[in-house]
Image (spheres, grey):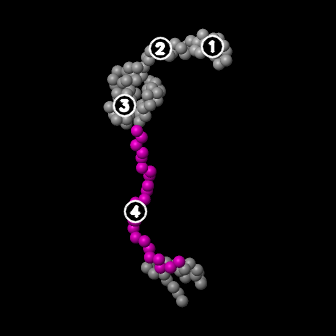
Amino acid sequence: MVSGGFRLDFLLETARLARSTYYYQLKQLDGLDKDKELKTEIQAIYSEHKGNYGYRRVTLELRNRGFTVNHKKVQRLMKILGLSARIRRKRKYSSYQGEIGKKAENLIQRRFEAAKPMEKVLYGCDRVCHSK
């Protein structure tokens, strides 16, 4: 009898689980946390640096403190603890430098049609050359 007065073999058959799986999970619930010391150290490092450290920097700091630990394990534990680095947003690139140089005068006044070829061509002068 498990919970609610049902037999274990019926429950396992209904859930399509092996008996060994049930007892393995039961044992895991009672087991001690082997990463408890590592978790407390990760939380300490995270809080010391006010949440600015991600898993890479936390891993390096752990190694400096004498722990031999893989970055993937640190990443997994930080995810379990709900710790993530504060992301500082970078500004988007903008090549705009403001108004540089001087604008040419609007000599043609948007009248683009010419009566004959080369009528509205600017040469080295500051005005539109008209030949009438």
**CB atoms at circles 3 and 4 under 8 Å apart?**
no
Q: Which residue is pictured at 44% across the width and 15% down the height?
A: 32
Kindly report the distance in space between the C-alpha atoms of the residues bearing marks 4 and 2. 65 Å
* Residue located beneath label 4 in the image: 98
Kindly report the distance in space between the C-alpha atoms of the residues bearing marks 2 and 1. 25 Å
Image quadrant in which you'd find residue 41: top left
* Amino acid residing under circle 4: Gly
* Residue located beneath label 1 in the image: 6
Look at discs 3 and 4 and give the one toward the viewer.
Answer: 3
Say which element carries label 1: loop
Kindly report the distance in space between the C-alpha atoms of the residues bearing marks 3 and 2. 26 Å
Q: Which of marks 3 and 2 is nearer the N terminus?
A: 2
* Residue located beneath label 2 in the image: 31
Magenta-tinted stretch: 86-110
Q: Which of marks 3 and 4 is nearer the N terminus?
A: 3
List x then y, in percent, for residue 52.
37, 36
* 86 and 56: which is toward the camera: 86
Which image quarter is the C terminus in?
bottom right
Q: Which residue is pictured at 37% across the width and 35% down the height?
A: 51
Q: Which of marks 2 and 1 is nearer the N terminus?
A: 1
Look at discs 1 and 3 and give the one toward the viewer.
Answer: 1
List x then y, in percent, for residue 107.
47, 79
Whether 12 is drawn above or below 84: the answer is above
